[in-house]
Image (cartoon, rainbow, N blue to C red):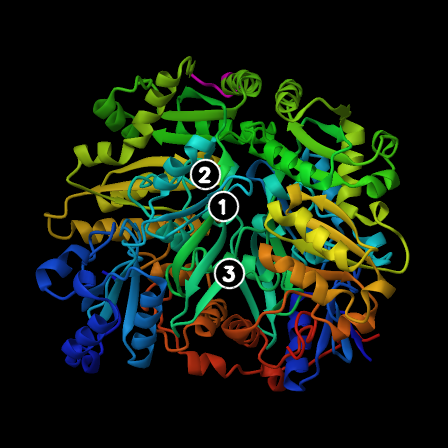
Amino acid sequence: MTIYRPSDEKQLSEIVARAAAERQPLEVVSGGSKRGLGRPVKAEHVLDVSQIAGVVNYEPAELVLTARPATPLAAIKAELAAKRQMLAFEPPDWRALMGSNAEPTLGGALACNLAGPRRVRAGAARDVFLGFSAVNGAGEIWKAGGKVVKNVTGYDMMKLLAGSFGTLSVLTEVTLRVAPRPETETTILLHGLADEVALRTMAKALNTPFEVSSVAHLPPAAARRSQVAEIAGGLGAVTGARLEGPAPSVAWRAEAVERLVGRGARLDAAASARFWEEAGEVHRLLPPDGRVLWRLCPAPSFAAAIVDAVRRRLASTEALFDWGGGLVWCSLDGGEAGPDAGAAIVRAAMKPAGGHATLVVAPEATRERSAVFEPAEGPLGELTARIKAGFDPFGVLNPGRMREGS
Amino acid sequence: MIRMPEPDGAVLARRSEIVAALRTIVPGEGVIDSERERRAFDCDGLTAYRQLPMVVVLPETTAEVAAVLRYCRANAVKVVPRGAGTSLSGGALPLEDGVLLGLGKFKRILEVDVANRCAVVQPGVTNLGITHAVQAEGLYYAPDPSSQIACTIGGNVAENSGGVHCLKYGLTTNNVIGVELVTMDGDVIRVGGKHFDAGGYDLLGVLVGSEGMLGVVTEVTVRLLPTPPGARALLIGFPSVEGAGECVAAVIAAGIIPGGMEIMDKLAIDAAEAFVQAGYPMDAEGLLIVELDGCAAEVDHLIAAVETIAVEHGATSCRASRSEDERLLFWAGRKAAFPAVGRISPDYYCMDGTIPRKAIGRVLKRMKTMEERYGLRCANVFHAGDGNLHPLILYDANKPGELQRAEDFGADILRLCVEVGGVLTGEHGVGVEKRDLMDTMFNEVDLNQQQRLKCAFDSESLLNPGKVFPQLCRCAELGRMHVNAGKLRFPDLPRF
């Protein structure tokens, strides 16, 4: 195995061009913290882009940041925080979840289209991705988008590359929209709601005009594992709704939301921030060992029914509801779930709701056997394959990562 | 004038046969053959370009759309999809040898799903029609292009339409969560739904804004937002447009993202005031309208904060709306800016570039010298929060050569936008209008990669050809990607 570690875009393009000429597939790795996410890549060699790093340009008043993809997220967050700004999509730190201590990078967050608990209001990585330069599977350097916040010139290739797991092109420079950091935040906590009731309550909170920016529901077992005292020490399940903004507005809106959904406890700004960080990172809230983990994105109102359907077949099921039910983390005992990690049961439970399911944590052999991502069949599957071939005709970029054989 | 692809003589020769075949798919008045009736479809909002379509087809069901596309694919007939035809970039300009596929009969709201905050609608529903259908539930559809009374959601999806409020609430792409798509092959594919994000490649993300070149959308699921409880606007006068621009930068630097922020220059202020008497400050060279929306506690707090920033940045006047009527009056002038300019000039040509806001002074200065060079006046309205310029070039189409001068002037403005780090179009799309300027932003490799995506959806380049790309797609040629590795040397590649 060879590890190629280019120091700039030009070297990177030459490496990919040669790999293409010799039909030698490459596993594309930035920091590597999410290397275990997706199917195992069928590649002899590694393209390590960790040297393609650094902030290129940051203009707070334009709400725009340009950086190379291997820039650590921590460095970007610190630079933004100094100007009281942030990445609104809150890329969660999944190191503990993935059992990795590698450095999470900006490119990784984009390639996996990450989104934290603020997804319901601020969108995902896809929604802030304004432009890029990249190398396609033939080694050609190409670019799309722009460096301003509003642009419809040409196809929106940023959306296509966000969440493509490095299978279409290798990013070499990216431009993102950044956002002001809210002055303060609070979280309203409602205790003891059953899942179905909690989902209706979360929908009600999101339907108020008071700009609730995150809503999550922790069933009793998940709540007990929280490191936020007010959540772990409560009695049973906890449902949280976050409000952010200027202090007088947050205070007023929290009152207004409570009038509609019921009185609850309040987290102060620091505890609120800790709780939502924990909700995004997930691992502490779910059982620790011998588990497989599914990430489900259904139509939100179906979330509780889906979990019930899985639990009827697999008693070890534990769940956690974020995005008002639009995101369900479903943890299963690996032994009980069986050789397909519960794929057949989970996907059947998702059917009535629509949406998609991803197997995030499972042994490598299982991820190799199963469809980790939502299967695409028929015309959609053929279209997906043609798109991949249009960017990577020789199949050298992360082959097998998203689909078997491509 | 931009040239369209040469019509295919073989297709034109088979016109009556094609019309007859289409009549077997779409019954009765759904196929429009007579020249008089086809005339109604010969242009969109970019009225300088007109072309009579070969035939107009107005299907009513997804199955009919699929059958029309399958027939056209099998017979190598080009297709131009059309919503309400309000495109300002010629996105729905017909082809002489093409079927004009109108989605105007897809007018139904299929479902309002309050629990999931979304609505499923047909593509011919108007943008404002969605909000009207859901407002009783306290919800609305956020993107609000100025043509929202007429433009359809299908067209919004094609163009990734914006509007006054998109700095805070996003463009169409951030507010559409699912579509039903018919491909040029006639396959019906569902992309997205009522859920977040994609389980594979984000095809929805790339379909939005694809200008009708990747597929025909027959159903759209939009995200709905709760209607803000209230809003107030500030009307702020500045001694220069640059001063207004600096104030906008300071508002954003202070961490405030207003619902809307609009700048107008002197010519636009005068025209609007003469038209609607909105009470604009006539001593101002630059007018800034800032709207804050949300609960009263937040709006009042932020109005005070923006007023302070405005005064610090040399505002010569500053008024906050005290009633809903007054807020609407502040907006009346801005919303009427285009027709107001239409009153002071026989014709105007609306441009749509985006620039980094810090470049506004430089861009305005250069536009002044262009006005002199071309002998044409230019009024400016400006979505200031996101740097989206709408210069309105005043001309008279009846004077020989003026349209050409206006087009050249416009092209120069767009080249300038790119030169200062901006882009050709913020929300109107490339269409026909800016097609031949694409190479100011993108090189051949960039455009080839975009076209390879097009080829994955439409291998024969039959769907809306002649738009967006300066050269027609050559899918067969593009499919044979060459690797230059043989010619490259690999000096000192780091290996470990």
Q: Position of residue B448 (x, y in %)?
A: 46, 71
Q: Are marks 2 and 1 in contact (CB under 8 Å)?
A: yes
Q: Residues within 10 Å of mark 3 (few under 14, many from 20)?
A: many
- Secondary structure of the residue carrying tag 2 is loop
Q: Quadrant of residue A40?
A: bottom right
Q: Position of residue A35 (x, y in %)?
A: 78, 64
In the rendering, which numbered label is found on residue B191? 3
Give whichever of discs 2 and 1 has the lower sequence position. Answer: 2
In this orientation, which residue lies closer to the viewer: A105 or B285? A105
Point out the stretch of residues depicted in magenta.
B311-316
- Secondary structure of the residue carrying tag 3 is strand
Q: CA distance from mark 3 to mark 1?
A: 14 Å
Q: Chain of mark 3?
A: B
- Name the residue located 56 percent from the left edge and 61 percent from the top edge: A160
Q: Quadrant of the C terminus of chain A?
A: bottom right
Q: Residues within 10 Å of mark 1 (few under 14, many from 20)?
A: many
- Give the residue type at disc 1: Asn
Q: Residue furthest top?
A: B322
- Give the residue type at disc 3: Val
Considering the whole magenta stretch, tell me its main secondary structure: loop
Q: Chain of mark 1?
A: B
In the rendering, which numbered label is found on residue B175? 1
- Name the residue located 43 percent from the left edge and 63 percent from the top edge: B181
